[in-house]
C-alpha cells in the first residue's frame, strides 16, 4: 500500500501508510549491514565511525518514523531533545572524571 | 454529582495526554538504561583492550540475527497500528501477532546464547571468569546486566503486546480508540532502540 | 478574581462525605487526588515521627562520651535508618505528594490529575516500598549500617539486609516517577481555559520543574540500586574493586540522582513559599517571571553538580574544578528567589500568622543552608569539612530548615482548606518558636562542631567536642518539644467543629474560591482565567475573611 489518503478520525493525526514504514525498515536493515561490514573491516576507526554515526541514525529512524515523532508536536520534540541531552550530559560530565584521572 | 469522580463514570479521554504520559515513561526507561551505558562507557575507556578481546567471544551472527528480528518486529508493530486505523482488523491482528512471535524468537535466541556462555563457565562469579583480566570480567558483568535487563523488558513487552492482541480481538482497540496500542508500540520501539545500541557496544566491539 | 465562597448553598457535600464507597474502602480505592494527598500526609507524618525519634536517640547517645544508651553497631543502623526514612519517606515525596496532589488540580482549575488511577498506584508503591524498607529491620542480617548512601564496597560486602532496604527505595522511586509523569501531563493538558503558562501560579510552576527532575533523575537511582542488588545476589562485579570495578563509579551514579533529589525537595518548598508570602503580605509577588525562570534553572543546573559530593573520593582534579564551578552557578537562581520574596514584603501589609512565621523562618534558615553549601562547593574548604558535622549542619539547614519548614508552612496555610477546620493560632506560634530556637541550637551547633573537626557518622566523640554535643542535644529536645506541640495542635484542631469560609487568609489563587473543604469535583463550573496571577485588590475591597 502506498501512502494512504484516508482521512484521519477527529482528534487523531494523519495516517502514514505501509509503504513509508517498509522503506524505513529496509533502510534500517541496510544500515545494520553497513555497520557490521565496517566493524568487521578490521579498522577500529571505521568501527568507531559505525558506532558514532550509523547507530544514532538507526535510532533516529525508529524514533522519527516508527515512534511517529516526526509528526508530533514541537513541544514533544523538545521534550525528547531534553531527555537525550540530559543523558548525554550525564555521560559527558562523568567522563570529565575518567578521562583526566 | 455525589458519586466519586471515577474515570469510568464520565469517560475522560485525552489522546494527546495519554500519549504524552507514555512518552515521559519512555524517557525514564532511556535514563534507566542510560545509567548502564555510563558504566559501560567509563569501563571501556579504562580497559579498551580487554573489552575488545572479550567481545570477540560473543556470537556476532546471533547478535545480528536478533537485531534483524527486533527491527522487523518494530515494523510489524507499527503496521498493526496503521491497519487498526484503516479498519483492517484481520491484518492488524496478523501484524500484532507477528510482533509477539518475533519477540519470542528474540527471547529464544537470547536463552540459547546465555545457555552456551554459562555452559562455557562464563558467568558472573564463575571461577573461569574470575581468572580473566579485570576488563574482561567487567565486560561480561555488563553484558549480563545490560542484555539481562533488556531481555526482561522484552519479556514484559511480549506480555503487554499479547494483552493488546486480546483487546484487539475483542474490539476494545478500534480505529477511533487505539491509544493503548500506540503506547504499547512506543514501549516496543524503545526496547528496539536499546538493542540498536547494545549491538555495536557488545557484539561488534571486537 | 472573585472569591465569593461557593459553599454548601448548593447542597453539594464536601469530598469527605461525597464518596460512593463507605468507610476505609472510600480511601483505599479512591482516585480522588484530595484523598490521595491526605493519605500521603498521614503516612508521611507517621514516618517523620519515627525518623525524628531515631534522631533523638542518636543525640542521646552523644550526651556522654563512650557508650551511652547503645552499641556502636546500633548507632550505625540508626543513622542509616534516620537518613533513609527522612529522605525517602518524608522529604523527597514531601510537598508534591501531599500538597501537589491536593492543590495542583485545584490551582490550575481542573477536576483531578491527568491519570487518577496512576495516582493511586503511586501511593500504593510508596507504601509498598516503605513496607519493604521497614522489613529490612527485622530480616536478613538486620537493618543496614551503610549510611543512607549505600556506598560500595561496604554495601556489597556487609551482612546487614542492604538488599531489602535498597529494594524498598527502588520501589519508592517508581512512586516518585509516576507522580512526576502525572503532574507534567496534568499541567500540560488540564489547565483551565485562559490559564496560559504565564498565568499559572508559582506552586504549580514549581511542581512542573520538580516533575521533570523526578522523571529524568530518579531512573538513575533505580539502575544504581538494582546494580547493588545484582552485585550482592549474583556477584555481577561492576563495583567490585577486586575485579577491576570502580567504587567511585557507584558514587557518580548514586549522586547523579541524589543531588537532583535535593532539588526535588526544595523547588516545591520554594513554590509554597511563593504562595504564602504574597498572601500574608497582601501584595503581589515581586518578579513572577524571574521566579518561574529560576525554578526551571535550578532544576536544570542543579542536575549538573552532583560530583561536589565526591571531591575527596579520588576523582580527577579537572573534574573537580568543573563541578565546583557549576555548583557556584546553581546558587544564583536560588538567591534570585530570596531577593524576590524579601522584595515582596517591602511596602506590603505583613501579617505574622503561623504560615507566614514558618515562611519567614524558611527564608532565614534556607539562606544559612544555601550559603554553607557555597562554602562546601569550594574545594579548598571542602577538603577540611567533608564528612564532618559541618555537612550535617548544612543539609539539615536546607532539607529541614528549608523543605521541612516550608512543609509546615504549607500545612498551616492549606489546613483550613484541606480539613475545613482551624488550629489554635497561639499554640501554633508557641510551637514555632520552640522549633525555631531548638533548630538553631542543634544545627548551628553542628556547623561549629564540624568546623572544629567532629566527623559525621561517628558514634563517639573526643573531649574537645563534648560541650558542643551537649549544646546540640539540648537544642534537639527544645525542637522536638516544639514539633510535638505543633502536631498536637494540628490534630486537636481536626476535632473542633467550626465553619471555615472559602477564603480565611485573603488569598487570590483558585483554591480560595471553592468551599473548605472542597467538593468532590472541586469546581461546580470550571473557571475561566482572565487576569494575571497574584492580583490583589487594594485594601477596602478585600476578600471575605
Image (cartoon, coloured by chain):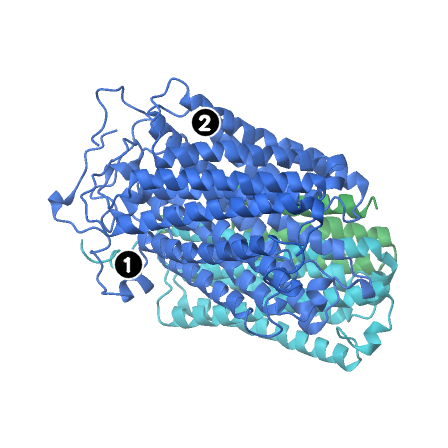
- Residue C80 rendering spot, x and y as whole percentages: 60, 59
Asked whether the viewer can see residue C104, the reply is: yes
**C-alpha gap between disc 1 and disc 2:** 39 Å
Q: Chain of mark 2?
A: C
- The green one among the chains is A
- Give the secondary structure at mark 1: loop
Tell me the number on the disc at residue C341: 2
Along the line of sight, which residue is nearer the eye, B149 or C137? C137
Residue at the image position 45 percent from the left and 66 percent from the top: B92
Residue density around tag 2, few if under 14, some if 14–19, many if 20 or more, within 10 Å? many
Q: Mark 2: which secondary structure?
A: helix
Please tell me which residue lies in front, C467 or C518. Answer: C467
* Furthest residue toward bottom: B119
Per the image, the residue denoted by label 1 is B6
The correct choice, above or below, for C535 with respect to C238 in the image is above
Q: Where is the C terminus of chain C found, in terms of image quarters?
A: top left
The cyan-coloured chain is labelled: B
The circle drawn on residue C241 is none
Amino acid at each position: 500500500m502506498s501512502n494512504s489518503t484516508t482521512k484521519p478520525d477527529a482528534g487523531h493525526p494523519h495516517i502514514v501508510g505501509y509503504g513509508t514504514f517498509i522503506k524505513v525498515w529496509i533502510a534500517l536493515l541496510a544500515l545494520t549491514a553497513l555497520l557490521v561490514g565496517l566493524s568487521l573491516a578490521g579498522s577500529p576507526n571505521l568501527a568507531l565511525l559505525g558506532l558514532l554515526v550509523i547507530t544514532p541514525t538507526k535510532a533516529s529512524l525508529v524514533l522519527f518514523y516508527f515512534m511517529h515523532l516526526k509528526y508530533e508536536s514541537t513541544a514533544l520534540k523538545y521534550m525528547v531533545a531534553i531527555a537525550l541531552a540530559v543523558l548525554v550530559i550525564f555521560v559527558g560530565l562523568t567522563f570529565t572524571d575518567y578521562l583526566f584521572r | 454529582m455525589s458519586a466519586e469522580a471515577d474515570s469510568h463514570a464520565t469517560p475522560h479521554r485525552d489522546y494527546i495526554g495519554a500519549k504524552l504520559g507514555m512518552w515521559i515513561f519512555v524517557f525514564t526507561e532511556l535514563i534507566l538504561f542510560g545509567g548502564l551505558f555510563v558504566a559501560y562507557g567509563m569501563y571501556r575507556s579504562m580497559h579498551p583492550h580487554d573489552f575488545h578481546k572479550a567481545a570477540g567471544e560473543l556470537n556476532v551472527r546471533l547478535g545480528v540475527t536478533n537485531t534483524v528480528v527486533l527491527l522487523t518486529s518494530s515494523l510489524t508493530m507499527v503496521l498493526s497500528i496503521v491497519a487498526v486505523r484503516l479498519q483492517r482488523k484481520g491484518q492488524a491482528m496478523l501484524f500484532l501477532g507477528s510482533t509477539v512471535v518475533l519477540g519470542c524468537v528474540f527471547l529464544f535466541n537470547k536463552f540459547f546464547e546465555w545457555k552456551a556462555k554459562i555452559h562455557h563457565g562464563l558467568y558472573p562469579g564463575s571461577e573461569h571468569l574470575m581468572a580473566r583480566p579485570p576488563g574482561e570480567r567487567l565486560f561480561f558483568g555488563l553484558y549480563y546486566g545490560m542484555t539481562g535487563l533488556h531481555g526482561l523488558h522484552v519479556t514484559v513487552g511480549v506480555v503487554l503486546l499479547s494483552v493488546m492482541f486480546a483487546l484487539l480481538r475483542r474490539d476494545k482497540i478500534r480505529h477511533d480508540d487505539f491509544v493503548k496500542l500506540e503506547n504499547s508500540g512506543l514501549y516496543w520501539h524503545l526496547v528496539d532502540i536499546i538493542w540498536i545500541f547494545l549491538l555495536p557496544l557488545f557484539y561488534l566491539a571486537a | 478574581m472573585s472569591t465569593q465562597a461557593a459553599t454548601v448553598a448548593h447542597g453539594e457535600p464536601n469530598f469527605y462525605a461525597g464518596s460512593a464507597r463507605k468507610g476505609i474502602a472510600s480511601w483505599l480505592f479512591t482516585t480522588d487526588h484530595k484523598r490521595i494527598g491526605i493519605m500521603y500526609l498521614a503516612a508521611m507524618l507517621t514516618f517523620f515521627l519515627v525518623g525524628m525519634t531515631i534522631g533523638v536517640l542518636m543525640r542521646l547517645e552523644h550526651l556522654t562520651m563512650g557508650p551511652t544508651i547503645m552499641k556502636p553497631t546500633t548507632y550505625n543502623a540508626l543513622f542509616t535508618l534516620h537518613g533513609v526514612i527522612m529522605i525517602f519517606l518524608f522529604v523527597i515525596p514531601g510537598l508534591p505528594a501531599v500538597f501537589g496532589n491536593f492543590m495542583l488540580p485545584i490551582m490550575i482549575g481542573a477536576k483531578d490529575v491527568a491519570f487518577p488511577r496512576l495516582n493511586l498506584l503511586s501511593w500504593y508503591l510508596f507504601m509498598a516500598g516503605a513496607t519493604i524498607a521497614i522489613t529490612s529491620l527485622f530480616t536478613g542480617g538486620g537493618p543496614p549500617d551503610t549510611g543512607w548512601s549505600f556506598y560500595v564496597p561496604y554495601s556489597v560486602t556487609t551482612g546487614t539486609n542492604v538488599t531489602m532496604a535498597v529494594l524498598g527505595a527502588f520501589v519508592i522511586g517508581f512512586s516518585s516517577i509516576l507522580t512526576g509523569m502525572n503532574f507534567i501531563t496534568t499541567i500540560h493538558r488540564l489547565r483551565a481555559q485562559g490559564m496560559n503558562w504565564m498565568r499559572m501560579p508559582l506552586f504549580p510552576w514549581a511542581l512542573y520543574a520538580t516533575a521533570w527532575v523526578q522523571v529524568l533523575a530518579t531512573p538513575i537511582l533505580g539502575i544504581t540500586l538494582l546494580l547493588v542488588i545484582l552485585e550482592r545476589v549474583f556477584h555481577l562485579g561492576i563495583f567490585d574493586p577486586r575485579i577491576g570495578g570502580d567504587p567511585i563509579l557507584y558514587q557518580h551514579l548514586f549522586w547523579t540522582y541524589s543531588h537532583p533529589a535535593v532539588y526535588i525537595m526544595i523547588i516545591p518548598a520554594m513554590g509554597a513559599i511563593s504562595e504564602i508570602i504574597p498572601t500574608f503580605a497582601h501584595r503581589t509577588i515581586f518578579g513572577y517571571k524571574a521566579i518561574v525562570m529560576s525554578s526551571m534553572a535550578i532544576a536544570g543546573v542543579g542536575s549538573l553538580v552532583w560530583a561536589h559530593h565526591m571531591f575527596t573520593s579520588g576523582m580527577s582534579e579537572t573534574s573537580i574544578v568543573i563541578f565546583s564551578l557549576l555548583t557556584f552557578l546553581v546558587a544564583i537562581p536560588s538567591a534570585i528567589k530570596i531577593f524576590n520574596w524579601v522584595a515582596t514584603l517591602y511596602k506590603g501589609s505583613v501579617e505574622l500568622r503561623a504560615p507566614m512565621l514558618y515562611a519567614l523562618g524558611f527564608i532565614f534558615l534556607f539562606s544559612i543552608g544555601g550559603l554553607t553549601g557555597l562554602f562546601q562547593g569550594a574545594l579548598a574548604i571542602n577538603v577540611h569539612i567533608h564528612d564532618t558535622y559541618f555537612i550535617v549542619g548544612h543539609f539539615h539547614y536546607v532539607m529541614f530548615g528549608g523543605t521541612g519548614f516550608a512543609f509546615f508552612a504549607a500545612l498551616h496555610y492549606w489546613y483550613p482548606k484541606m480539613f475545613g477546620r482551624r488550629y489554635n493560632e497561639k499554640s501554633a506560634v508557641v510551637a514555632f518558636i520552640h522549633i525555631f530556637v531548638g533548630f538553631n541550637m542543634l544545627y548551628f551547633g553542628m556547623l561549629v562542631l564540624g568546623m572544629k573537626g567532629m566527623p559525621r557518622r561517628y558514634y563517639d566523640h573526643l573531649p574537645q567536642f563534648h560541650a558542643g554535643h551537649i549544646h546540640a542535644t539540648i537544642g534537639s529536645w527544645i525542637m522536638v518539644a516544639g514539633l510535638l506541640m505543633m502536631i498536637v495542635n494540628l490534630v486537636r484542631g481536626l476535632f473542633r467543629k467550626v465553619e471555615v469560609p472559602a477564603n480565611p487568609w485573603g488569598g487570590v489563587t483558585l483554591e480560595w474560591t471553592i468551599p473548605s473543604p472542597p467538593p468532590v469535583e472541586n469546581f461546580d463550573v470550571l473557571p475561566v482565567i482572565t487576569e494575571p496571577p497574584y492580583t490583589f485588590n487594594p485594601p477596602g475591597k478585600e476578600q471575605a475573611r
